[in-house]
Image (tube, rainbow, N blue to C red):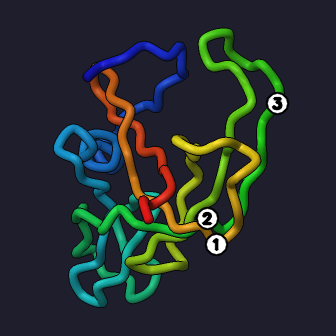
Amino acid sequence: MSIDTGRMLPEVTPESQAFWTGGFEGELRIYRCQECRGWIHPPVGACWRCRSRNVGPEAASGRARISSFTVNHHPWFPAFPPPYVIAVVELDDQPDVRLTTCIVGIDVDAVEIGMAVEVVFEEHDDVALPFFRPVAA
């Protein structure tokens, strides 16, 4: 479902296209080195570990843990009222791969460091933004 939240949307590049569009198929697509099998984010044309150029997008598990977060109280955009949580999450697939995202589906006062979260997508015309919500117990 495509919704208009008044968000500023990212510019899609050839390297980032899989990341920004994978959500239309329910996948969190992160670049992965085909040589050393390390995950790479943000997407670039070579592995920073082994220097291989044999890299490309793969579906990650979509599971993560909150590494750090802040609660925004400033009304930056009228269509996106505060408070909301901006967080850095560590992917379960490889914890040194981190994404900056919003945490949704939970009261801002209940968010905790180390909380298990899973990806959900907010779809727009040409991008599906990856957000995270608490994993159901």
Residue that carries the numbered disc 1 in the rendered image: 114
Residue that carries the numbered disc 2 in the rendered image: 66
Q: How many marks?
A: 3
x, y percent for residue 63: 40, 66
Comparing 69 with 13, the one in front is 69
Q: Residues within 10 Å of mark 2 (few under 14, many from 20)?
A: many
Kindly indicate the quadrant of the structure image that contains residue 17.
Answer: top left
- Image vertical order of residue 130 relative to residue 88, above or below: above
User: Split into 4 quadrants, where in the image is the N terminus?
Assistant: top left
Distance Cα–Cα, label 2 vs label 1: 5 Å
x, y percent for residue 77: 68, 15
Q: Would residue 36 appear left or right of 64 to someone viewing this image?
A: left
Question: Residue extending furthest right?
Answer: 74
> Please, what secondary structure does the residue beneath circle 1 have?
loop
> Please, what secondary structure does the residue beneath circle 3 have?
loop
Residue that carries the numbered disc 3 in the rendered image: 73
What residue type is disc 3 on?
His
- Image vertical order of residue 17 relative to residue 29, above or below: above
What residue type is disc 2 on?
Ile
Q: Residues within 10 Å of mark 1 (few under 14, many from 20)?
A: few
Distance Cα–Cα, label 1 vs label 3: 22 Å
x, y percent for residue 44: 39, 61
Pointer 1 or 3: first along the chain: 3
Q: Would residue 58 appear left or right of 73 to someone viewing this image?
A: left
- Image vertical order of residue 2 relative to residue 48, above or below: above
- Image vertical order of residue 18 relative to residue 46, above or below: above
Q: Would residue 90 appear left or right of 41 to someone viewing this image?
A: right
Kindly check if marks 2 and 1 are in contact, taking CB atoms under 8 A apart as contact. yes
x, y percent for residue 34: 21, 80
> Please, what secondary structure does the residue beneath circle 2 have?
strand
